[in-house]
Amino acid sequence: MKPFRDEIESLEQNGITKVAFKRLDDPKVIPLWFGEGDTVTPEFIRDATKAALDKGETFYSHTRGRPELRNAIKHYLDNLYGIDVDERRITVPGAAMLGVTIAAQMVLTTGDHGLIVGPVWPNIDAVFRITGADLSYVRQRLTPDGWRLSADEIIDAVQPNTKAIFVNSPSNPTGWVMGQDDQRKLMQFARDNQVLIIADEVYHRTVFDSAYAPSFLQVAQQNDPLVVVNGFSKAWAMTGWRIGWVVTPLRHEMHWTALSECFNTTTNVFCQLGAVAALEQGEGFVAEQQQQFQHGRRLVDAALGNHALFDYTSPEGAFYAFPRVRGCTDTLDYVERLLEEEDVGLAPGYTFGPDNESYFRICFAQSHDRLQEGLKRIVRFTEKYYG
């Protein structure tokens, strides 16, 4: 008898690291594979963290996050969305990904079903699988006007034993943004049928026609079956810090206390004070980042938007493009050869869920000269082999 569960034995490395680990630290590579830019975390955040270390902030802290950080998150969300979030609903369990993991563990087990809106970051698939539940995808559609998916299409994909729906908006990798009316309709369905929505909103400040994306928090009641996951990685250039937060049903305050303690004991203590500084002083930096990503998107639009070999529409949010290569049915092979021949790192489409084998993901958060050179090499390579 095997000591490990089948769900664990069957796990595979995701396609992004499968490609990237081969040349992760090679300075010749233009790295457009991971979800981060090359902007260092701003100095005022680093200074607050160093000050916390110098004061000796190195001991255990509150399991659900330092009170001053949870309070700062509350005020940030209240001011951004015009709402009044009860602070008792906020937990800082560690990285945002840990929030997704705990939420999935709370509702899914063998015999249940989880529904994922795709294309989606590959680790979500793994998080759902290791619960023992079955899973399926409802896929966004690429249209001439962008990626599209309605609340009705999501609801139609729900099965009798569906216990959780995962929605990432703005979407990694497509840039799709779920509108407020669709959020309201899906939230009402989840409320009526007691299905948990796990809403990943980590790209909430990266949208191209507004200061922020619509949030499920704006349409939900405090005890609705909803976990909103967010974090500091993207808007504040803090990918390596691994700090995120969740807003959960009020009645689960103690459940998140217990589970956070089981999974992580407490979030990095001194880094939490850097996170407070990010929320309280970071709006100028967030605006600068939005401008950076706006221009990055324009560069991708110019390179791929009217090119005969790519099916591409400009993303509404996040900082990724997810084009399809016409005539290509295996973009794992495509990105591996591109890396070998042109020293550009991309993420292969298959790893973002079913029916994405002809697509690849570009992160356009990099500095503009670097991004532009990478795009030039991508086009050159594609014209050479598919033109």
Image (spheres, rainbow, N blue to C red):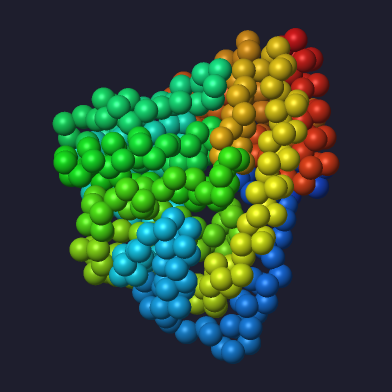
Of the pair 103 and 8, the residue shown nearer to us: 103
User: Residue 339, how many percent across, how many down?
Assistant: 73, 32
Q: Residue at x 65, y 39 (%)?
A: 363
Q: Position of residue 19 (x, y in %)?
A: 63, 36
Does residue 23 show up?
Answer: no
> Residue at (75%, 25%) from the top-left corner?
303
Considering every residue shown, the one lying at the far bottom of the view is 55
User: Which quarter of the figure has residue 43?
Assistant: bottom right
Task: Using the image, determine if residue 210 lies above or below residue 325.
Answer: below
> Quadrant where the N terminus lies?
top left
- Residue 17 lies left or right of residue 254; in this view the side is right
Q: Is residue 274 above or below residue 353?
A: below
Quadrant of the rendered image containing residue 41: bottom right
Of residues 51 and 344, the one nearer the viewer is 51
Figure quadrant of the C terminus: top right
Q: Residue at point 35% right, 63% down? A: 84
Residue 170: x and y in percent read: 50, 41
Farthest front residue in view: 82
Q: Is residue 15 left or right of residue 335?
A: left
Q: Is residue 36 visible?
A: yes
Q: Residue at x 28, y 36 (%)?
A: 185
Q: Taking 247 as reference, is 363 above or below it?
A: above
Q: In the displayed structure, does residue 384 sit left or right of residue 170?
A: right
